[in-house]
Image: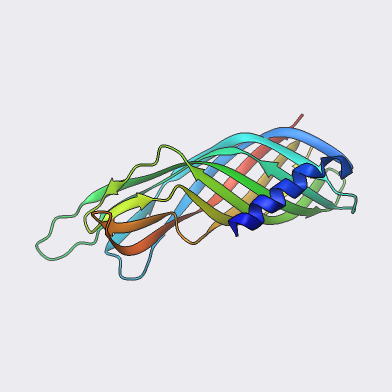
Amino acid sequence: MKKFFISLLCLVLMNVGTFAQIRFGVKGGANLSNLSFGSGSHYSIDNQMGFSLGPIVKFSLPVKGLDVDVAALYDYRNAKVSSLELAGSAIYESAIKQHQIIVPVNLRYGFELKNFEPYIFAGPQIGFGINNKEVEMDYGDWNPKKNNFSINVGIGTIFKDNWQISLEYNIVCGKNADVDINNNQVLYGGKMNALQLCLGYYF
């Protein structure tokens, strides 16, 4: 899947001249993490708010209503993990933080109304981890992977010609980290999906 993503991104960049219109902008917003573990985990999860921010470029395709957007965003997600309460046992809390540069490539389909241009979109995304450290937890350690592949789906609208707002859900394919003991025995995997509300502006 990662090779497919890279091939798709290269294809888009090599054919920039075939697009009818190109617009540059910035995009940012808030995200609510959705951390989950494999079956058999001994944790309760308190998902926290994070954010993303960075440049975006939108390419209009020759087919009416179809666009492609590519972004490079700094993305921060986090959650609090607590061991489940057992008789006679203390409760341990850990903070899981994920810093990454994400590159989403979304295919959009929209239509024009009087003052708005609503659209739906979906596409692949690759994330490159930065400054991610192993986190010690009660039943195992969160050992983050260097990169991950995911899918975006969502809806949005352009208004006043330059502004864009979108609601999207990012679904990790595979896992963001291994939960293991002493970097040896992998207990299960962890993934951190996210619900994102973003605002963008095109120059």
Which residue: 59% across, 46% down? 197
Q: Residue furthest top?
A: 203
Question: The C terminus appears in which quarter of the rendering?
Answer: top right
Of all residues shown, which one is farthest toward the left?
88
Image quadrant assignment for residue 163: top right
| Residue 161 visible, this orientation | no
Residue drawn at (69%, 37%) of the image: 56
Question: Could you say where residue 15 lies in the image, as x and y percent from the top left?
Answer: 82, 44
76 over 170 or under it: above or below:
above
For residue 67, above or below residue 151: above
Residue 191 screen position, x and y as percent: 44, 57
Question: Residue drawn at (27%, 64%), measured in percent from left and top?
Answer: 42
- Position of 148 with respect to 109 (left or right) is left
| Residue furthest to the bottom | 39
Q: Residue at x 70, y 43 (%)?
A: 70
Residue 18: image quadrant is top right
Q: Nearer the viewer, residue 62 or 32?
A: 62
Q: Is residue 62 left or right of residue 182?
A: right
Q: Is residue 120 visible?
A: yes
Picture mark count: 0
Measuring from the top left, give residue 82's x and y in whole percent. 27, 54
Q: Position of residue 80 (x, y in %)?
A: 33, 49
